[in-house]
Image: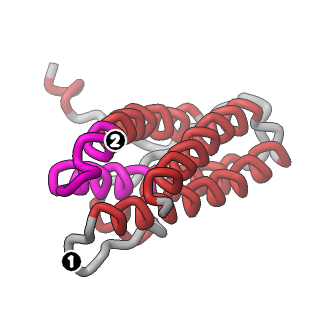
Amino acid sequence: MTAALNVKPQIAPVETGVRDTTPIAEGLSDVLADTYRLTLKTHIYHWNVEGPLFFSLHNLTEAQYQDMFAAADELAERIRALGHLTSGKISGVLSDSAIDDLGQMPSAGEMCKDLERDHMRLAHRLHALIELAEARKDMVTGDLATERAAFHEKAAWMLRAMSAS
């Protein structure tokens, strides 16, 4: 039993037919970092939104952060299925992410615009991952990235429509 407690995760070669999995795992890691930061930011806005948009933005952000939290697990498991490790440090998540924090708590309209920008930033990162995955014959990652890009593009559209004047 003691030996079972001493097993450490490690990179393992996997023969799936995918060529050169390292850049794919790195791309997935970047998307995972963005997903975590955007999930947390969305959750914080969910808690703090006020004003006439409260109910609709509160409900929209709840659905979005729940979806992204579940997606983070799928992204991490894909990294592992390719034989790589996920980031083991919060500092790694922060440094790998392109999602920024705002200085102070924004208004409901500013929340919508900020989240819309972040969803589009993540969608663009996913588009690049799709191209990378397809060039290396990794249709599974390509499909996952396509599904995630569709979610983020729709989320951005909903937020953009909500904040339109």
Looking at numbered disc 2 in the image, what kind of residue is underneath it?
Tyr
Side of 22 relative to 67 (left or right) = right
Query: Is residue 37 rendered magenta in the image?
Result: yes
Residue occupying the point 76% across, 52% down:
132
State yes or no: discs 1 and 2 in contact (Cβ < 8 Å): no
Q: Secondary structure at mark 2?
A: helix
Residue beneath disc 2? 65
Q: Residues within 10 Å of mark 1 (few under 14, many from 20)?
A: few
Residue found at the very far top of the displayed protein: 1
Residue beneath disc 1? 104
Quarter of the view holding residue 142: top right
Query: Residue 66 placed where, x, y %?
Result: 33, 34
| Of the pair 50 and 18, the residue shown nearer to us | 50
Quarter of the view holding residue 105: bottom left
Identify whether 26 is placed above or below 73: below
Side of 51 relative to 85 (left or right) = left
Query: Residue 76 placed where, x, y %?
Result: 45, 39
Query: Residue 104 placed where, x, y %?
Result: 21, 77
Tell me the quarter of the image containing the N terminus.
top left
Residue occupying the point 31% across, 52% down:
42
In magenta, the rendered stretch is: 34-59
Quarter of the view holding residue 106: bottom left
Residue found at the very far bottom of the displayed protein: 103
Identify whether 46 is placed above or below 104: above
